[in-house]
Amino acid sequence: MSEKNQEMENIVSLAKRRGFIYNGSDVYGGLSGTWDYGPLGVALKRNIMDLWWKTFVEDREDMYGVDAAILMNQKVWQASGHVDTFVDPLCEDTVNHRRFRTDHILKDNGVNPDGMSMEQMDVTIAEHGIKSPDGNPLSKSRTFNMMFETLIGPAEEKPTVSFMEHGSIKIEMGANTYIADGTGEIRAGARGINPATSYLRPETAQGIFTNFKNVVDSFYPDLPFGIAQQGKAFRNEISPRDFVFRSREFEQMEIEYFVHPDKWQESFDSLLADIKSFLGSLGLPADKIHELEVPEEDRAHYSKRTIDIEYDFPIGKEELLGLAYRTDFDLMNIQNNSGKSMEYTIKGTNDRFVPHVIEPSFGVERALMAVMSAAYTEDEVNGEKRIVMKFPEHLAPVKYCVSPLLKNKPELVEKAREVYQMLKKKHGNVMWDDNGNIGKRYRRQDEIGTPYCVVIDFDTLEDGTVTIRDRDTTEQKRVNIIDIEK
Ligand code: ATP
């Protein structure tokens, strides 16, 4: 196993062992691409999301939060282009029929698929004689739509079968019709989308665009202004992999920042600067963050500029988030398909236009994976190896651990409970630990990244001082209870 894969394995194993992240539906053998957050994982994830919300919404005057429904009218996804084009290229092992993402197959074989059409990918696979990971020939690629479809209300996709003239059979399923004409082939007849069909949203962005007019009507903010949303997104990824990095259910933190078409550049630059400063507050080292200016041939056709922020994850340099100038593409689509005006008038003028938009789009799982890998450290204390998660203090799932030196001394336990309650009232994320000896407790707390361990001993009863130990330096200081927080 390479050193990098080993590092990833270590993080995945710590995440499971210490209650950060478990496999989804684990007791039933799991469900690929899904993950469950344990008590520490949910605390860490919430801290990251809350910091983002505070930074980009609460601390700013130009940002409005929304929380739109996950299920949306199917027209949203038709107008946005997702029904037709939210696809990945899929190829199949011709022997065992395992399916793969064609661009991933190329990448795994050292070929950069960026900018290639699906046909070019197939040609490259043929030219290089690339086989499936199981060593078998690969089929030609086809597109695979990544949206999870579902039916709203008591609608069922039950087929109705009717017999036609000449022995043909007509099968109707929802809005689709198929004809079996006795030749062994089934032809597709009229195709359409069942009016009851909806999708689990593959991005939070559309819930923002569809509320643009509502927010403008309620608040009439001056341009530029942004609407922000956090929440679940679902993508039926062909091959979920790399821990939570590519999941089928994940969370996004997105902003649509509405600007005057002539002034997009300055908002783009200032959002980029704000994002970089936010990444710093996540404790991510600047030398592991890279800006990739996405070339025109790789950008969505409507985007005039896109920067992918990549991070040196243990799995390699990969996309952490994207910042895209999407012009007026989304609002114009909504205007054209809904018949409702998306125009904005600058107050006191006749300057009326559909605003352009800049979109910073951040995946929570990728943020969390970056934070965990930046924090993961192996070092040595007094000749003993230890694993320590050096989370920034404001992100650590547990801030203080409080213990009595000995758990069978009621007077120590009582005093320790007092200190614990005092800190817990203020911070919430305070843990009680009286298991094993102090050394073992420190190791456990190091592994979950608790910045401070407070120990109550016999001196505490005499002079009101406690031992406070620093996670990173392992230094222990004697301080008065009222000075713990100083
Ligand atoms: P990729 O090329 O890696 O599939 P993408 O370009 O499709 O990502 P976007 O559609 O731009 O991703 O989504 C915005 C952000 O959402 C990404 O930068 C990433 O942080 C996150 N994201 C996208 N897909 C997933 C996923 N399957 N699992 C976890 N996070 C994801």
Image (cartoon, grey):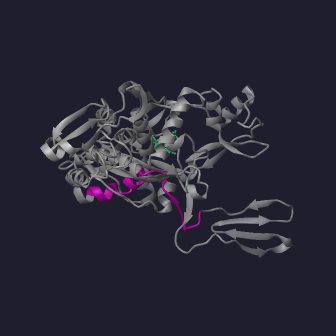
Image coordinates of residue 148 in percent, x first then y, are 56, 56
User: How many marks do you count on the picture?
Assistant: 0
In the displayed structure image, the side of residue 133 where residue 324 appears, left or right: left
Image coordinates of residue 372 in percent, x first then y, are 42, 38
Residue drawn at 26 percent across, 43 percent down: 455
In the displayed structure image, the side of residue 239 where residue 265 appears, left or right: left
Image coordinates of residue 29 in percent, x first then y, are 61, 55
Q: Dividing the picture into quarters, in which one does residue 218 lie?
A: bottom left
Q: Can residue 325 be seen in this view?
A: no
Q: Which of 486 and 294 is in front in this view?
A: 486
Q: Dividing the picture into quarters, in which one does residue 267 lie?
A: top left
Note whether 113 is above or below 204 in the view shown.
above
Q: Can residue 54 be seen in this view?
A: yes
Q: Is residue 209 on the magenta stretch?
A: yes
Q: Nearer the viewer, residue 200 or 164?
A: 200
Q: Dividing the picture into quarters, in which one does residue 119 lie?
A: top right
Note whether 74 is above or below 121 in the view shown.
below
Residue drawn at 16 percent across, 47 percent down: 461
Image coordinates of residue 474 in percent, x first then y, are 31, 31
Q: Is residue 225 on the magenta stretch?
A: no
Position of the C terminus, as image quadrant, is top left
Q: Give the range drawn in magenta.
A: 193-216
Position of the N terminus, as image quadrant, is top right
Q: Which of 223 and 321 is in front in this view?
A: 321
Q: Nearer the viewer, residue 291 or 381?
A: 381
Note whether 461 is above or below 386 in the view shown.
below
